[in-house]
Amino acid sequence: MYVRYIHYFTGIDTTMYIIRNGLSVFIIVIVLVACGVRSPTSAQSVISYNYTFHISRSTLPALFYNDMTYIAHVGAVSSPLVTINGSPVISSTYNLTTGDVVFSSSQTGQVVILFNSAQVPTNMIVQKAPLKDNKAWAWSHGMDDNVNLQNQIDLITAKGWRASLFVIGKDVSPTRQEPGWIIDQPGLVTLINQGWNIGDHTWSHACYSDQTAAEVTDGLAVVQQAVNASAHPDHVVISFAAPCFDTVYDPIFRGLRNGPTTLLVDELGSGSPSLMNIDGGDYMAGGQTATGFTSADFTIGRDTMIESDTTATQVFDWMSANAGPGRHYWFNTLTHGNHEATLGPVLNYADTHYGSRGTNELWMAPEDEIYSYLLVRDSTTVSAGVLTISGSATITPISTAIVSATATIAATATRATTVTPSVVVPGQTNTVHLPFISRPLLVGGTATSTPSSRSTAPLTTVEGLTPTLTLLANPM
Ligand SMILES: [Zn+2]
């Protein structure tokens, strides 16, 4: 008879056979080097972890879009599952190359990311994505004056995209009197149902005279009427575009703002940027400037270059080439009617180069959706994350022969009962010792060894987030 001891060490498996035969005792030690013949007992331990943090949000104006995208770096793990307040998040993706879990939700509360890993997770952080779905840059397009817009609407819809219409209130007829020519109320309702943004372009398009508050409020009433008749009566109208880019409307519009309930997006013209760095700082390169988007009180401009040519594609190229950490862009454009000959190629270029048929770095959305995202983003706070070990570790078998043995090992192994991580200092790289990577294991005998080596896991804080590592349970 013999008793077999199996020890695990990094790179080396030691198998000891103690053979008893009458008065003679023969001890044969066989050392198998990792690069030679590895024992099937060299499987790694897979540990289940919980990474927990909290999302909170300061008071926001009434908005239709409340989604936020988060980027959680977990490293090379398996089966990450995101839950918020106990419910799984559907819009979650995991990229094994980057080690990032990206997910979106409108909820606040407790987030738990459950995953399995054979390695100790390191450098775990959670960040708010600058733009929805962690895209590199955004493009919004608007059309105003509700005249000759149907062909352009069709081009955008054919891409699966949505945009904004800024309507002149008095010209929105209650029924379809002039199909394809004047956008009437049934047409507006259809577009609202499809997720389009409908904005106020005043009641009569008065500019350079008669710019009254009633022009704004009466125009808004028509838009609100269409929203009320739609399948999304909760679609909060927040967009206003001044006719003739008339800046006289600016103080009138701002005077209508009343905390959380009134219009928020103020589209003007001269002096307002149509290309913005939504990370906050201005950026200039190659003669192109992206003006820092700084607050909810920001006014945005409308670039009309698409009405004459397709050079808007050069702005797309510039945004793609210059986007990066601290530089995410938002480009806002405008056309009136009958510009489908240039809008079409620009849409195709954006789609095939940077949309889902290209690099997929473009977030094409109506301006109210992008604007809302920025408001939500800047009002959202993410707490420091806490890493815990959950459940029991299992030793992954690499052959069926070891399966029964691992069950015995788990029942008799000696392991530490308490773990005290080193102090985690915010802003510095911290080292945390975990005792479970290498440990003595026993089958059919008595184990006397103690843990012989430990793993180290650097933990780094990023951008004010203070990660902590807490061990709530033993790894096995
Ligand atoms: Zn106009």
Image (spheres, rainbow, N blue to C red):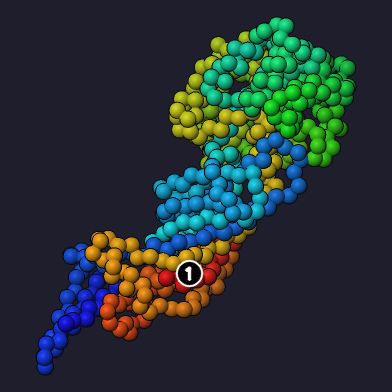
Image label count: 1
Q: Nearer the viewer, residue 281 or 140?
A: 140
Q: Quadrant of the C terminus?
A: bottom left
| Image x and y of residue 299, in percent | 73, 32
Q: Residue at x 20, y 69 (%)?
A: 33
Q: Residue at x 48, y 44 (%)?
A: 93
| Image x and y of residue 26, in percent | 13, 86
Q: Is residue 92 left or right of residue 262?
A: left
| Image x and y of residue 2, in percent | 18, 81
Q: Is residue 270 left or right of residue 460?
A: right
Amino acid identity at mark 1: Thr
- Residue 101's place in the image compared with 462, above or below, is above
Q: Residue at x 33, y 62 (%)?
A: 396
Whether residue 91 can be seen here = yes
Q: Residue furthest bottom?
A: 23
| Image x and y of residue 410, in percent | 36, 72
Q: Residue at x 88, y 17 (%)?
A: 210
Q: Nearer the viewer, residue 468 or 186?
A: 186
Q: Is residue 316 left or right of residue 181?
A: left
Whether residue 281 can be seen here = no
Q: Quadrant of residue 166?
A: top right
